[in-house]
Image (tube, coloured by chain):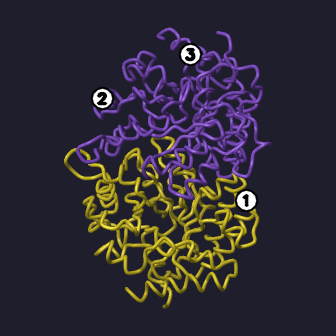
Chain colours: A yellow, B purple
Amino acid sequence: MSGNLAPSDPTPSSCAQSADADGVAGSREAFGSRLTQAMTQYGPVCVGIDPHAALLESWGLPVSASGVREFSLRTVEAMAGTVAAVKPQASFYERFGSAGVAALEETIAACREAELLCIVDAKRGDIGSTMAGYAHAFLSDASPLAGDAVTLSPYLGFGSLAPAITLAESTGRGVFVLCLTSNPEGATVQHARAGDTATVAATIAAQAAEANRGAVPLGHVGLVIGATIGSALADTGTDLENLNGPILAPGFGAQGAGPADLARVFGPAAHLVLATTSRAVLQAGPDTASLRGAAANIVAEFSAVS
Amino acid sequence: MSGNLAPSDPTPSSCAQSADADGVAGSREAFGSRLTQAMTQYGPVCVGIDPHAALLESWGLPVSASGVREFSLRTVEAMAGTVAAVKPQASFYERFGSAGVAALEETIAACREAELLCIVDAKRGDIGSTMAGYAHAFLSDASPLAGDAVTLSPYLGFGSLAPAITLAESTGRGVFVLCLTSNPEGATVQHARAGDTATVAATIAAQAAEANRGAVPLGHVGLVIGATIGSALADTGTDLENLNGPILAPGFGAQGAGPADLARVFGPAAHLVLATTSRAVLQAGPDTASLRGAAANIVAEFSAVS
């Protein structure tokens, strides 16, 4: 497939040098456009970078910040030009403290250099000036922790995430808000109902849709919805028809979901799904060609059903 | 008031050198005991370390990782021996990337050195091995980001936090799980009901109580409940009678709540409350004596009503 990336936009995600005091450069294309282009070019697959101890050991790397750094840089190198996006998992970096966070920064910078979309899976959430601090950390051009998007957690209400949603829009970045997950404990919160009306998950989805209304080709407020949730979308009355934003769906590959689940679980919203897989690719490492081959096989499986 | 800290326990929070592979030293007293001792000795006040830009500027410090570091170390020095605990807010460190996170590590180390309890306000939450990564980062003796407790966010269900709850218990640390907050958007999630039964907030509180059952003098699973929630405990049916764990309550001081709200909002659970205040103390800086004076005044207000 030929690339859809506009040749007139040579630095889509590297504008820090011209950022103003709020870290807003303003010259990056919108996240919805950039993600749509990447998914058109490479298919709807995102590879999770989850450098946990067992994987580090199987790659012959030390269980340390430097091991995590090496693991991540090799994965970025292999995935650039192979898949639409990668998703480094913040916790596996933070467990090595600031040295691990520095490795995350290098991973994000390597993605920028390779023009590979980077979704930082940090699941942050707070209120007021504290939320603004997280927004700055993960969505400002001035921050070394800012990739192309960040995951957020809405226990304090979707509205509490406004500082991040606003800053993301102005810097050409995106957010993915937790909505419905497949772990059994998730239902105690996500399936709960506000009065006799909508469930928590349905409310989050409706608020994301509202934020994305009118955006072309796609808004910048995505949702996280597990691929192995079964009938939970229907059970919770979560309507994705008007979402107009991307869906980050973990659970493909080693966790059990396959390309056929795209239509089965997400129905008419299947085209919005960025399918996330991790172990099925990473266990093929550390060899670059093997990593690429494992990812290409998964991409091919998705192409076959779409 | 004379100290209640047991003289036979000279290193209550500095055991990293004897940690095993899981970062469990096993020789630290339980968090519930240590917090109870500190609250008995110093009163029920926790000072939030929130080094946002306006405060850094008013202290004459640069808005940078080194400014945040200096601000935090001065605050720790002033608060040691003055209040029961401090609560550094992770987002204000993360906004400066790994350099900011290194400043958070130094802040945590300074608390340990000063025998001042440190609650890292990070509001982390995830599932499975990812949650285990966060648990390791904030609750393991082997991690430079581990204070005495960490705040957690339960959008993925209270049960998803188990790796942190388990590790905290084995390392003598604690967790504070988000329950009820005062921001208006919080109700869309926290007041929602699972079927015709309990609200989300009530369910979280009941699960924390279950985790703390039988602990003496207090369990290690706390809740975060805003001091300015009005009647939300009653509205949501959140019962704290059997909690047997601490309540971290932001909202005192500049945010509007006073010592009289302890009984009004928390009723018979008022004795479990660690009242958090930030701006009312920090705006007295950077002078150490002024910071101490401001904190001592607030502690005295609480003593007057208890």
| SS at badge 2 | helix
Q: Nearer the viewer, residue B301 or A6?
A: B301
Report which quarter residue A10 is drawn in: bottom right
Mark 1, residue position: A65
Q: Residue at coordinates 51% horizontally, 42% vertically from top-left?
A: A130
Q: Is residue A14 above or below residue A114?
A: above
Q: Residue at coordinates 26% horizontally, 48% vertically from top-left?
A: A193
Report which quarter residue A56 is drawn in: bottom right
User: In whole angstroms, how far apart are the C-alphas of marks 2 and 3?
Assistant: 28 Å
Q: Residue at coordinates 40% horizontally, 17% vertically from top-left?
A: B263
Report which quarter residue B299 is drawn in: top right
Task: Specify the amino acid type for callout 3.
Answer: Val
User: Which mark is in front, 2 or 3?
Assistant: 2
User: In whole angstroms, how far apart are the C-alphas of marks 3 and 1?
Assistant: 41 Å
Mark 2, residue position: B234
Q: Position of residue A63 (x, y in %)?
A: 73, 61
User: Which mark is in front, 2 or 1?
Assistant: 2
Mark with earlier residue (2, 3): 2
Q: Chain of mark 1?
A: A
Q: Position of residue B42 (x, y in %)?
A: 62, 17
Task: Specify the amino acid type for callout 1.
Answer: Ala
Mark 3, residue position: B299
User: In whole angstroms, how far apart are the C-alphas of marks 2 and 1?
Assistant: 47 Å
Query: Residue most toward the front?
Result: B214
| SS at badge 3 | helix
